[in-house]
Image (tube, coloured by chain):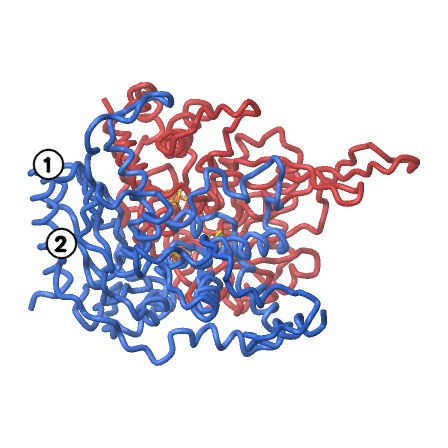
Chain colours: A red, B blue
Amino acid sequence: MKVYKISREGLDKWIKHWTESYDVFGPVEKNENGMTDWAEVKGLDEISTAPGTTKQPIKTFYLPQPETLFTFTSRGGEPDSDVLKETLDEGRPRVLFGVRPCDARSVTLNGLAYEEDPYYMANVERTLLVGVSCREQCGTCFCRWVGGSPFGTEGLDILLIETEQNFVAEALTDRGVSLVEAGGGAREASGEDLAMVESMRQEAEQAMSAMPDTAETLRSKDLMSMYNADFWGGLSESCINCGACTFLCPTCYCFDIQDEVVRKKGRRIRYWDSCMFPLFTQHASGHNPRGQKVQRVRNRFMHKLKYFPDRFGPVSCVGCGRCIRECPVNIDIREVLRDLLGVE
Amino acid sequence: MESSSSKITDEIRAEASRLLSSGEVAAFLGFVPGSLPMTVRPFVARSSEDAARLVWNSFCVMNLANYLPEVLKSVEPPRGPGDPEPEGPLPRVGVLATGCWSRNMVVQIQENRIQRDRVVILGISSRGMVDRKKVLARLGGREALKVEEQDHSLLVSGRAFNEEIPRWEVVRDNCRSCVHPDPVIWDIMIGERAGDRQNANRFAQVEEIESLAPEERWAWFQEEISSCIRCYACRNACPLCYCPTCFVDDSRPQWVGKSIEPVDTAIFHILRAYHCAGRCTDCGACESACPMGIRMRLFTKKLEKDVLEMYGAEAGMDPETPLPLSTFSPDDPQDFIVTGQESPKSTGDEAGRSGEVSQS
Ligand code: SF4
Ligand code: SF4
Ligand code: SF4
Ligand code: SF4
């Protein structure tokens, strides 16, 4: 890791230089609702400094909605008729600027499940993440309960930390170092800067309640006792089974695949699906193993907090709080997490 | 001074507790406080301890009629698909209802979704619910950590700020244009009935869009739905949407594409709105549920206006009046059918519609 110091003006120059070889995206204020979302940017002044996360997670860059996997024609006579042609997206590389540590972590966590997926990995390959640490946490943030931190670096190429007058930039990967070099104008951080960042990191982490070993505790619990716990019923009575929580969650990555064909030309697309929808598990026979709402509600949490940790280690939640914020009926995953941790 | 919401809360708790402990109802459908400011959670109380948790405030934006059929089913004795109906009356469910929710219940009775004698309705005259998104917009990115409700204002506080917001300014659009705040059916009234509200023009928002040229209107529509993520919170929050398989979920045949291609999103919204025509009570639950701030209720509001103009009907105002679009009589005027001749009595106040008739 290399640590640099850069001024606000310097950062603006970085972005301007990067746009020569990258598409640069950042959180911008989208509408009068005070909602920020990802959009292409050309300079620092376009980027919102509001605390907390954007409306949509950065999974839209890794799991586009929809994503074309193959194209095909079924026009007999044409040489490539009836052949599936892979369409790996090899567009311009891009920089996401101003990523929160929780969102950055989601890319790594999803990568555990998508390791062998060439489409996902191609997007990982061409997307550089410049994060910004959280000086202020929102009421819905709980990264420290699920293995993250407001100063977390997992998944990032660069982490920016705003100090009194300047920014400290931790270049965490080779890609990060080359980004800093391409941006130009940065000085190496002094020992004083490093000490300041360290104390800020400690302060931020102490300001937030932590829950150590969440994943470990959940893994050690009995799966069937969790599955049969009595709180699922009440939870599902409030839930309207929409897709708001899963679609806006950075670590919900389930999809469905369909062929769309118009006049014998078609594409095979992958698009978001949600375990909250009955169709998600509907069998061709008509049988649905998760035909009831309570089963679907349970699945969302069990997948994130038990099945995923059992299989991959960490919990499949980065504590961004979007599902809490956006749920129309205030289903709060923190309560479910506490309930699950309490299961004997 | 005690706010009117907290008085209503006390009365709801007392009534719900009485109904539950006397066994008059097996369950009571209301709200409990949420974990964030300006949120509540729909909740099914089954004991008087549960009833003590119920709450009423300006953030009760979800329409409880939407939950009613499911809760009614949950209190029935379990039975298999072929089993006969149990003898004797089935257990009842208590529920809160404002004007629009009670009208949705009327529609549910008319559509055989619920039976009147199985619900005990606690009627509340609505003062209009607050739009959380409007409050957040006024804060411009500052986080509200606490919101205290008073009768005519909200006291919002966060890190290093306190702000008083006049309540009516952040009331939802549907509530601001509502003329029927009182329940139309109820068993027990909580608080006073307010009477119909005067509203200079409840369709003003719709008329503004109607006045645009067709291309502009189309552009407005496309822009409005452009950020839709197809999460279907709007559909699932609505008591009218109960098809066992919604047309958007059907795969054999598949009526509409599944992703967020603009044309697919547009079809979803147009069809959803039309399926609600003549049935929608403008309760606004759809709009409140939407995470993306899409004002899809304007589409149903336009249809509410059309149905009122063409049929003189408003959904759910009277259990005895059949729903306008699900009845037929041989002498219905049919001047909207294009017959090849000039329509004898054009209702067309809209350029597009009368244009179509004269072209044919
Ligand atoms: S938890 Fe909330 S957001 Fe998720 S499906 Fe249920 S109602 Fe929708
Ligand atoms: S489950 Fe909720 S808090 Fe966790 S990552 Fe997903 S949206 Fe964020
Ligand atoms: S369409 Fe919207 S306003 Fe109309 S009844 Fe349904 S949820 Fe309420
Ligand atoms: S709730 Fe909003 S985002 Fe979700 S489908 Fe409806 S309009 Fe689209």
Q: Position of residue B84 (x, y in %)?
A: 31, 23
**Residue A237 location, quadrant:** top left
Q: Report the chain holding disc 1.
A: B
> Left or right of A124: which side holds A210?
left
Q: Provide the secondary structure element on which disc 1 rests.
A: loop
> Left or right of A174: which side holds B209?
left
Q: Residues within 10 Å of mark 1 (few under 14, many from 20)?
A: few
Q: Position of residue B263 (x, y in %)?
A: 63, 55
Q: Position of residue B166 (x, y in %)?
A: 25, 75
Question: For the residues marked 1 and 2, what is the alpha-carbon distance in whole angstroms?
Answer: 16 Å
Rendered residue at 54%/53% (across/down): B271
Question: What is the quadrant of the N terminus of chain B in the image?
Answer: bottom left
Pick the residue in front: A144 or B42: B42
State the mark number for residue B188: 2
Q: Position of residue A128 (x, y in %)?
A: 59, 48
Q: Residues within 10 Å of mark 2 (few under 14, many from 20)?
A: few
Pick the residue in front: A218 or B87: B87
State the mark number for residue A242: none
> Left or right of A336: which side holds B11?
left
The amino acid beneath tag 2 is: Ile
